[in-house]
Structure formats: C-alpha cells, structure tokens
Amino acid sequence: MKIFKGKAFFFKSILFHIFLVTIIAIVSLSFWENPIYDTIVNSSSATINGSKDISLVIIDNKSLENYRWPWARSLYGEIFEYFNNYTNAKVVVFDSVLNSLDKEHAPSSDNFFFQTVGKSKNFIGGYMARPDEYENPSDGEEYDNEFHKKFSIDLSDKRTSDNTRTSSYNSLTMFPKPYFDAQKYAGSVNLDLNPIDGVLRNSSDLISYNDNFYPSLALRAYMLANNTEKLTLTNKHLVVDKTGLKIPVFKDNGDIKHNIKFYKLLPNSEYSHENYSAIDIINSNRLIKSGKKTIINPKEFDNKFVIVGANALGVEDVLETSISLKHPGADIQATILDNFLKQDFMTRMTTGQNIAIIILLSILTFVVILNMPFLPSLITLIGMAVLYFIFCLLCFNNNIIPLVITPLAVQLSTMIFGYSYRFILEGKNKEKIKNAMGKYLSQDIMKNVVQNIDDIKLGGKKANVTVLFADIRGFTSMSEKMTAEEVSVILNEYFSEIEPIITKYNGVINKFIGDAVMAIFGEPIQDINHPQNAVKCACAMLKKVEELQEKWLFEGKPKIEIGIGINTGEAFVGNIGSEKRLEYTVIGDMVNLASRIESYNKVYKTNMLISSSTYSQVSDLVDVIKIADVTIRGKAKKMDIYEVLRLS
C-alpha cells in the first residue's frame, strides 16, 4: 500500500509537471522564442552580404524633392523605359500595387506607363490578396477567372499530408484593365507579419486563393529569369523543376512559406542590397534620349534583377524584420529573391525533433537531480544549458532553426520541479526514518536530537530529575509456562497501554529492560513538577494494569502484577557511548536507588514505593505508609521509603 501511494505521488507529480511544461512551452513559443531568434539571426546568420545580382531602384527623399507625391504615372513609365531600352536586366520587378487610374494627371500619363509596361518582356507587377469580399461579387468572380487564365502557373501538388488548400483571402486587388492587359506576369506582395509582435520572419512563397496557388513577387521573378512555369509541391519542399531549386517550406494559414534568411545591411544603410535613387534613373533616361552623358551607366544593370519600390518620408514601405525595425519593402523582396538565387534557406527543425529535444533534456535534468548531490547537479545542469545554447548557435550558423528558449525554459521548470520533488521525497523519507526511530527512541528524545542535529556530541549536564522503574511480578515463572509468542503478545499490549500514560505526564521512556520499563521525568521535557507527575503517572499505570487484569482474565491469560519504584535527585543527563554510537540516558546513584527501591515491592508485597526525596515533594499529594530504616544494598546508612496507597 505504501509503495502504491509512493507511485501515485510520483505519477501525480509527473502529470502536474507535464501540465506546467505545456503552459511554459505555450508562453515561450508566443513571447520568448521569437525575440531570441531575432537576436541570434542578427549576431550569427545575418552576416553575409546580399547578392550583387540584385539592384534596387528606390523612390526616396531625393526623388520627392524633384517631383511631389503622388507621382504621375509617366514618371514610372520613364523608369521602366530606361530598363526596356537601354539595359539587359534579367527581370524588372515593380514592388507596388496599382489598383486605380491616375486621376490627378492627364490620361496620357497613364497611357505612357501602360504602353511602356506592354513593351516589356520581363516586367512583373505586384498585387495583393485580401481578406475582404469584393464589393461587386459578380465582377469579382469574372476578374478572378481572367486573373487565373493569365497569371496562373503549372503546379504539381504531390503532398501526401495536410494537402488542403484552405485560404484566408476572399478577393484580389483589381488592376485597371489597361494595366491588366499590359502585364505579362504578376506576383503577390503579401507578407505575413507575426500576429503577436508584428515582425516579419517568413515569406509567403505561394498564396492560396480560390483553391489555387499563386507565386510571390520574388518567386515569380526567379521563375521568369529561368524561363519556367512549372513547380512541384511536396510535404517539405517547393521545387522549381527546371533548376532543381528546393525551398524548405511549411504551411501556415493555407499559404506555403519559408523562413527568410536575412543578409547583412550595407555600411551606413538600411538596405542589404545595392540601391539607386529613382530620380537618377529618370534623369539618366532623359539624358540618353537627348544624346548626353548619363548619370548611371545602363551596363550596371546587365543580367541583374531590378526591384523598383518606394521608401521616402510620407510614403514609407517598411516593415519590422529580424534585423531592422524599419526594413524597406523592396529590400525584403530582394532578400527573398536572394534566398532563391543562393539556394540559401533557414530550415526549421520539425515539431517532432523539437519535442524529442525537450523530452530528452527534461529526462536528463530529472535523472541528474535525483542521482547527484545538490551542488554538483546544479553545476552539471548549468553546463547542459550552456552546451545546448552553443548547439543552437551552431545550428543557426548552419541554417537550421531549433527552438532555443523553450527547451531551456522547460529545463528550468524541470529543475524547479525536480529539486522540489527531491526535497519533498527526502522530507517524506526523513519523516519515515524519524517515525521508525521513534519506535526505538522516545519521541521527545527524537525531537531533542532533531533540534540539535548539528551539535550532537558526547556529554550532557547535571539535572534534578525523577526516575520511575516499573517491573512485572512473577514474569520469570509466567514465561516458563507460556510460549515466547504468547509472552510477547502480553508484553506488547502492556507496554502499548502504559506508554501513552507516561507521555501524558511529561515522562520519557528511556528504555525497556526485558519486562521492566525505565522512565525519566524532568528531562528532556522541562517540568518543575516532575516528582508529582511521576507519582500521578504511577497511580494511573496501576489503574490501567487492573483494567488489563480483568481483560486478560476474560481471555484466559495469566494475571500479572507490577511493582513501581520512584526516586528524585540529581543525576547526569545526556549522551553517553562513543562517537559512532550514542545513547541518551540518565546515570547516577539516584538511578540505581530507584531500581533498588522498586525491588523492595517483592519484600513488602507492595505495588508502589517512593524514596524520601520524592516523598518530600509529594507529601501533600499522597497517602502513604512509612517503612523505616530499610537497608538498601550499596548504601551504608539505612533509609526510609514510603508505600503510596492512593492520591489524597
């Protein structure tokens, strides 16, 4: 039964720990894991320069100083005209969403822009999928059909698990018809921020809309540069069939995403890729057309990916990422495209791998706590935590993303749980030992030992105490007529009945001597009335024996009598023995006298005899008969002893 209770306590503790770990893991994943991820990315993985094959054209503050915002579409047209006519750029990406005509400028402004886009064979425009419904559902349905016909890709979905195409989007930003007709390629600019802290860490490579997948702006640029329309989606990868590019992806809110690998920002810049002012491109285009020397040589863009975006005061297109509080959107698109070009990806450990690490770390922590002393185990566990953190840094340097804080938080909770469990277990074991030893030693002596646990040594003190000896009459002859088992039953019942009586009167059983018992009053329990309590205790013991006699007579057991001797005086009280084996007891001539007084009960056929020193303390408490001039063995002088008849 005790073993069962021990197991029940263990399993209840484990269940509580699992519940606690689950709560900690949820909190850690929600609030702690992402900040440490950003810190490590900044210090370890975002240390590589961005590709020189990507250039940014930014509508910056310098550009707005020349032309106020909003810009006429013709200015955009001049930018793309420059790349159409004078450069050999691989792909030109417009990181902007145009969903209306330019109503502030003449129609010729829009027309020039649309004509320029129409002439481009490598232009990709941006659009956005939205959660809102179309204002006009029938127009929206028609637009979706036309959009799918023109901008869909050849995707082979070979996923065998979690292959649904649920979507959180209900509409697309609608291109003006001339712009729709002019474009040959389009890509999504949707960038999904973390809902808790608003930081961008993942790229939505394929958005799920109307049971179809559409590529992001960056993925569309990579596909166009490699002249392919075919992708294959597996459980773990998105594969560009023609190049063999394998993007490690995961599904989130229906979209197919990968963790963005960020690159080092350029010196004194908010960009990680080479960038140019849009006004310099426009002026260069005009200078070339007029036969003058250009500001920016078009050859700088040969065989490069060009991304056009805005990042000026009042028109910022910025998001918070792992490496920047205000990361320009165009540079984010360049970073995602760069991941594809370099085949440089951050791969997340699977849920199973992370759970296995957490479980292993918890088990090792618990085993160390239960099997090692406190200080060595604490040092070992700190070392384990440091080693795990180093392991995480190595993983990040190799583009692997483990959980960092969550396993360490779980380890910390396991340490708290483990040490608490160990403390409770040790406390229970100590209590068991204390209770077990209390059956061999007096509970009061046990308390005295526990209270002075750090100062246990040989020695003691002189103290005025009262010693009580109680002995069974005729025990030897009774033992000869009964079996040992029968004798032990009677003795155990007798001792069990008198022990509470002695305790009640502040007495301490010092030892059992065969059929006799020796009790001390006055130490270690401090009691100024120890002579009176010793006599009261003796009277109660005699009364209890009378009750037992009636019971044993009914049960057919022999009748027993007891004799009690009591003496009061000064004795040595404390620990005697050796350094390895101690006994708490009382020694001295007064102890021997108490024993010898008890033996005179046989001579005078009495039940309780007390010394004159005890009688002097209890004379007003008892009725006695004086027995004068008794010769006590070991004593030169005769002395008086007293038979106690009753409490007066």
Image: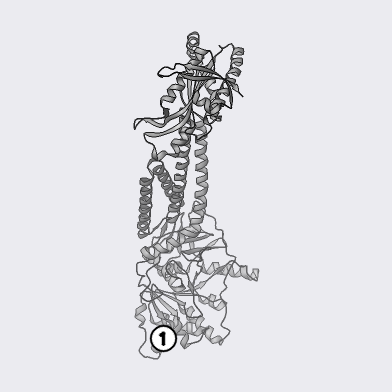
Q: Report the amino acid beneath label 1.
A: Asn
Instruction: Using the image as rendered, state which of residue 552 and residue 423 is in the foreground.
Output: 552
Residue 556 image position (x, y, % from top left) = 59, 11
Q: Is residue 191 left or right of residue 636?
A: right
Circle 1: is it few (<14), some (14-19), or many (20+) Cα within 10 Å? many
Quick check: can you spot residue 513?
no
Q: Which residue is mark 1?
A: 285
- The front one of 295 and 391 is 391
| Residue at the outermost top position | 481
User: On screen, 61 above or below 596?
Assistant: below
Q: Position of residue 639 (x, y in %)?
A: 46, 19
Q: Is residue 321 above or below residue 487?
A: below
Locate residue 203, reporting x and y percent: 47, 64
Residue 562, can we see it?
yes
- At mark 1, the secondary structure is helix
Q: Quadrant of residue 176?
A: bottom right
Give the residue drawn at x 40%, y 70%.
225
Which image quadrant: the C terminus?
Answer: top right
Rendered location of residue 123, percent (x, y): 46, 75
Within the image, what quadrant is residue 570 found in? top left
- By what rule are the colours in the image chosen? one colour
Q: Is residue 501 above or below residue 96?
A: above
How many numbered badges does the structure rendering display?
1
- Quadrant in which residue 135 is drawn: bottom right
